[in-house]
Image (cartoon, rainbow, N blue to C red):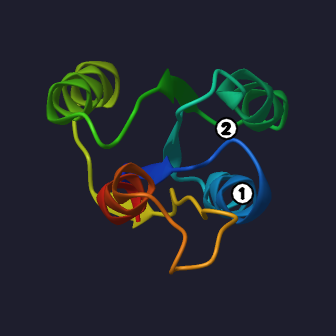
Amino acid sequence: MREEVALITGGARGIGKAIAMRLAQESYKVAVCDIASECDDVVQLIKDNGGQALGLSCDITDPLMVKEMIAQIIDTFGRLDILVNNAGIAQDNLLLRISDEEWLQTIKTN
């Protein structure tokens, strides 16, 4: 059994979910983070297949939430070795029409 622990941001669906599942198949302990609470489905899939996983709801643009998330991962698994920075957002707007707030949110998240 591997000891390495991986954190996947934006891990509840899509590419992030696929990465989380693959790392779990490779026997990594996996922390799945997403702004939505959809992490539970991925965590359950990993556990059902014999892996170890932790689901965390976190807004990665909030430094305090990120610090708390990392502390929880270390409390649970004892370490954190790998970060897969997969979280991202896309604004459905032309650059010329995007608001300052939408622009800053995109930069902060991506």
Crowding at dot 2, Cα within 10 Å, few <14 / some 14-19 / many 20+, comes out as: many
Q: Secondary structure at mark 1?
A: helix
* As drawn, 54 above or below 103: above
* As drawn, 70 above or below 8: above
Dot label at residue 51: 2
Q: Position of residue 26 (x, y in %)?
A: 63, 63
Apparent side of residue 56 relative to residue 47 in the rendered image (left or right) = left
Q: Residue at x 52, y 80 (%)?
A: 95
Q: Position of residue 79 (x, y in %)?
A: 22, 40
Residue position marked by numbered label 1 in the rendering: 25
**Residue that sits furthest to the front in the current view:** 97
Q: Quadrant of residue 64?
A: top left
Apparent side of residue 14 relative to residue 102 in the rendered image (left or right) = right
* In front of the other: 62 or 101: 101
Dot label at residue 34: none
Q: How many dots with numbers? A: 2
Q: Position of residue 29 (x, y in %)?
A: 49, 43
Viewer can see residue 107? yes
Q: Residue at x 44, y 58 (%)?
A: 99
Q: Secondary structure at mark 2?
A: loop
Q: Position of residue 54 (x, y in %)?
A: 52, 26
* In front of the other: 52 or 67: 67
* In front of the other: 52 or 73: 73
Q: Residue at x 64, y 21 (%)?
A: 37
The reply to whether dot 1 and dot 2 touch (C-beta < 8 Å) is yes
* In front of the other: 79 or 42: 42
Q: Amino acid at mark 2?
A: Gly
* As drawn, 47 above or below 20: above
Q: Quadrant of residue 110?
A: bottom left
Q: Amino acid at mark 1?
A: Gln
